[in-house]
Image: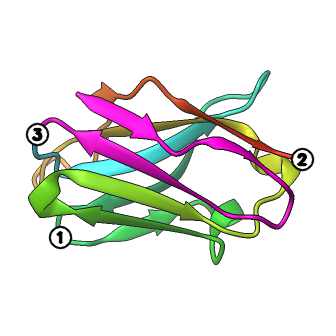
Amino acid sequence: QLVESGGGAVQAGGSLTLSCAASDYTYCVAWFRQAPGNDRERVAQITSDGVREYADFVKGRFTISRTNAKNTHALQMTSLQPEDTAMYYCTGGGSMFRGCEYDYWGQGTQVTVS
């Protein structure tokens, strides 16, 4: 349903863009991340009408976007820091009536910042 790409290794201060391709329309799409020993945490989300939300720890550094016609979305990450190292997951679901829900998950893509 959801396939991520674009992870990798980068030096501190660098940038990466993660991409996620969905097999079908999804009202809300989001990125979560999970570092070893930590809980999974939401990074950013965007609805089909363009409403965005960001975690405080990425505001001003990460940008989430989507292309509704292609059922794809992306997470542009700049000024990366070692604490951004984690497995990043794209997820999606919900509806305009129910709001954002995370029904479908990708397999994850690793981001390592040194």
Please identify the dominant SS of the magenta region.
strand
Where disc 1 sits, the SS reads loop
Residue drawn at (33%, 61%), measured in percent from left and top?
46
Residue 101 in the image: above or below residue 105: below
Q: Compared to 51, does 82 lie above or below?
A: above
- Can residue 94 be found in the magenta stretch? no
Q: Residues within 10 Å of mark 1 (few under 14, many from 20)?
A: few
- The residue at which mark 1 appears reads as 49
Residue drawn 60% across and 38% down? Answer: 33
> What residue did someone put label 3 on?
24
Residue interval drawn in magenta: 1-23
- Amino acid type indicated by mark 1: Asp
Separation (CA) of disc 2 from disc 3: 35 Å
Q: Residue at x 66, y 41 (%)?
A: 8
Residue 93 % position (x, y): 22, 39
**Mark earlier in primary sequence (1, 2):** 1
Look at mark 2 in the image and give the residue it sits on.
Answer: 114
- Which numbered disc covers residue 75? none
Q: Quadrant of residue 4?
A: top left
Provide the secondary structure element on which disc 3 rests.
loop
Q: What amino acid is at disc 3?
A: Asp
Residue 31, percent from left and from top: 47, 46
